[in-house]
Each structure stands twice: as C-alpha cells, then as structure tokens.
Image (tube, rainbow, N blue to C red):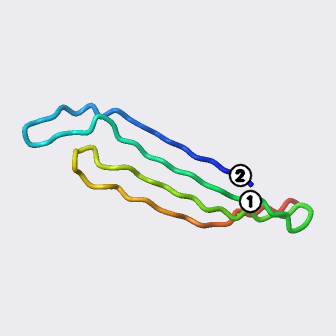
Amino acid sequence: MYFGAGYQQASVEDEDTPTTQYEDAVATFSAFVNFKYYIMKGFYIQPEVSYFDYGKNKEKGGGDYGEDILVGVHFEYDF
C-alpha cells in the first residue's frame, strides 16, 4: 500500500488597501492512497483515491477554490 501527501504555502505580496485586505499566506494540500495488485506475472492494476484542496482566495473573506476527490486505476503490462 502506498500513501503520499503534499503541502504548498506561498506568501501573499499584495499590500492591504482601505477596500481590500489580503491574507499573509495561501496554501494548497493533496493526499493519495493506492495499492498495487498483481493479476499475473508482468501485469498489475493499481487502484487509487486522491484528495486535492486547492486553497482559498488571497483576499480575506474571499472564496474557496474548492476541493476534489478523484478515483482511478493505473495499470501496467510488461511483455
């Protein structure tokens, strides 16, 4: 079984104005889990579930960019 995750944070360089306030930093996050299952010699499938959080807008009180959950299958056949 394989697990993985990633996190990225970036500073916001915009200066606050009387009408717009900005966050100090914004961040994104993702994680996955999968399992390699051998069907026969030289052939496997690898189901995976991944989660992505795209973070928030850099403006304070701004919107959220959303998140996704993806499900898929990797496969390989060596001949």
User: Residue shown at 77%/65% (left/top)?
Assistant: 45
Q: Is residue 72 left or right of residue 19?
A: right
Disc 1, SS:
loop
Which amino acid is tagged 2?
Tyr
Front residue of 6 and 78: 6
User: Residue shown at 86%/68% (left/top)?
Assistant: 39
The dot on residue 63 is none
Residue 49 lies, in percent from the top left, at 61, 62
Are circles 1 and 2 on residues that touch, CB within 8 Å?
yes
Q: Is residue 13 left or right of residue 44?
A: left
How far apart are labels 1 and 2 at the CA level?
A: 6 Å
Residue at numbered disc 2: 2
Which amino acid is tagged 1?
Phe
Q: Is residue 73 left or right of residue 9?
A: right
Question: Dividing the picture into quarters, in which one does residue 63 lie?
Answer: bottom left
Sequence-earlier tag: 1 or 2: 2
Residue at numbered disc 1: 35
Disc 2, SS:
strand
Front residue of 12 and 74: 12
User: Residue shown at 34%/32% (left/top)?
Assistant: 11
Residue 15 lies, in percent from the top left, at 18, 31
Q: Is residue 5 left or right of residue 35?
A: left
